[in-house]
Image (spheres, rainbow, N blue to C red):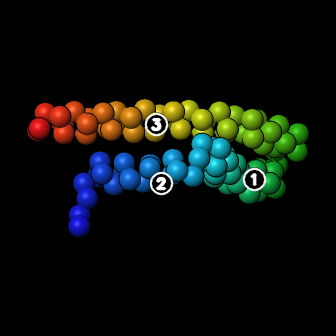
């Protein structure tokens, strides 16, 4: 059975949501920090940036990434709640 994009997004978020907020935030933090952990030493080598700058940038990302992931959670939760309310109103209007 084919699902609309809205239904797929709703089901996808329900699966992510079932795993929990903390896991989502940890996963997103890792997804954002891991490329930087690989890229910064490469930049350090190729562009000759200072080790202190590299270290401070990585620490900054490790501090900011969880907050960015939390904002992403709130955004997705708001869209999920709005979609659930729309579906509820559609069912009420049809009945």
Identify the residue position indicated by label 2 in the image. 15
Can you tell which quarter of the image residue 54 is in? top right
For the N terminus, the image quarter is bottom left
> Disc 1 or disc 2, which is closer to the eye?
2
Label 1, label 2: how far apart the Cα atoms are: 29 Å
Counting other residues with Cα less than 10 Å from the Cα at mark 3, is it few (<14), some (14-19), or many (20 or more)?
Answer: some
Query: Which residue is disc 3 drawn over?
Result: 77
**N-terminal label among 1 and 3:** 1
Considering the image in quadrants, where does the C terminus appear?
A: top left
From this viewpoint, is residue 57 visible?
no
SS of the residue under disc 2: helix
Seen at 60% across and 42% down, the residue is: 21
Indicate the secondary structure of the residue bearing disc 1.
helix
Residue 91 image offset from top left, x and y in percent: 18, 39
- Coordinates of residue 29 in the picture (x, y in percent): 67, 46
Query: Is any part of residue 82 visible from this angle?
Result: yes
- How many angstroms separate mark 2 from mark 3 (CA)? 12 Å
Location of residue 71 by image quarter: top right
Q: Identify the mark nearer the N-term, 1 or 2.
A: 2
Q: Residues within 10 Å of mark 1 (few under 14, many from 20)?
A: some
Farthest-out residue, left: 94
As helix, strand or loop, the secondary structure at mark 3 comes to helix
Residue 37 is marked as: 1
Quick one: label 2 or label 3, which is nearer the N terminus? 2
Q: Residue furthest front?
A: 95
């Amino acid at each position: 059975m084919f699902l609309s994009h809205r239904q797929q997004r709703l089901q996808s978020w329900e699966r992510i949501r079932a795993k929990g907020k903390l896991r989502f935030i940890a996963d997103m933090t890792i997804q954002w920090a891991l490329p930087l952990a690989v890229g910064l030493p490469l930049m350090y080598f190729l562009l000759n940036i200072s080790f202190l700058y590299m270290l401070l940038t990585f620490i900054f990302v490790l501090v900011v990434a969880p907050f960015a992931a939390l904002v992403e959670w709130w955004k997705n939760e708001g869209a999920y709640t709005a979609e659930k309310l729309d579906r509820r109103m559609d069912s009420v209007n049809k009945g």
